[in-house]
Image (cartoon, rainbow, N blue to C red):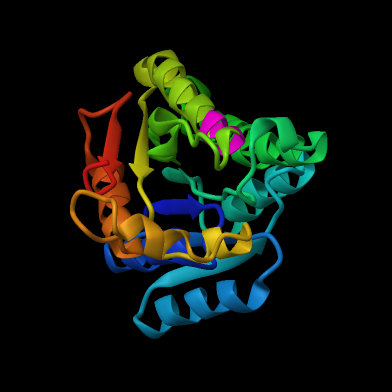
Amino acid sequence: MKPVMIITGAGRGIGAATAIMAAQKGYAVAVNYRSDKASADKVVAEIESDGGRAIAIQADVVDEAAIVAMFETVDRELGRVDVLVNNAGVVDQISRVDEMSFKRVDRMMKINVVGPFICAREAIKRMSTQSGGRGGAIINVGSAASHLGGAGEYVDYAASKGAIDTMTEGLSKEVAGEGIRVNTIRPGVIRTTIHASGGNPDKPDIAGSVIPMGRIGEPEEIANGILWLAEAGFTTGAFVDIDGGV
């Protein structure tokens, strides 16, 4: 039986690249999406055309019931999860903190922090050796923003990713004795649509000029790191920075 990986926000960008790469390495993949069914179906079709196994599952990570239903669907259709990749996330328009609305900050924290916590909760219930599981790995997609701070752009986003760093530090220790490894990968600016969706489409081009390596990253470069962490049996509580040297 193939090991099972759930990737949130897997219809595009880093999530899609990770799903395709994971399937190539022998995983059965649950491709989660919030609203873009066509993109998720396209990822599944690419995996299946290459002989892999994948399903697309709609679930908004701010909805607890939807998250629970997603994991139950995976249980039925693919089997008990072995790897969870908390990839779904959001950024917003450039703004100072004193200009941010409550609605913006609330949305940011629900998607980028609460969602990963509840997904991790459901994964632990299934992975933990204390619950009859066989162990597993949780990989959080953080950001270089967590240690850069996002001043003048998106301190709320940076703070949400800082919370993910702290979650990783604590949770990795909490479940290490139950066969579960928890790590975070921290991308820099990557060639995805996240900045355009947040109203800042020029961010990648501008960032490329100030990154020490002189370019932005590609989704596949992050996916490589995620897949390494999925198999790194003696690594937990780690932060892997793939950011071009910022």
| Rendered view: 220 above or below 71 | below
Q: Quadrant of the N terminus?
A: bottom left
In depth, the one of 82 and 186 nearer the eye is 186
- Residue 212: image location, x then y, percent: 20, 49
Residue 76 appears in the figure: yes
- Residue 7: image location, x then y, percent: 49, 53
- Residue 53: image location, x then y, percent: 44, 70
- Residue 60: image location, x then y, percent: 71, 52
Q: What residue is at 40 percent from the left and 19 percent from the top? A: 169
| Rendered view: 212 above or below 13 | above
Q: Main secondary structure of the magenta part?
A: helix
Left or right of residue 59, residue 186 in this image: left
Q: What residue is at 50 percent from the left and 75 percent from the top? A: 44
Q: Magenta span covers which residues?
A: 156-160
Residue 190 appears in the figure: no
Would you say residue 26 sits in the magenta stretch? no
Q: What residue is at 48 percent from the left and 65 percent from the top? A: 202
Q: What residue is at 39 percent from the left and 60 percent from the top? A: 206
User: Which quadrant of the view contains residue 155?
Assistant: top right
Left or right of residue 67, residue 125 in this image: left
In depth, the one of 147 and 84 nearer the eye is 147
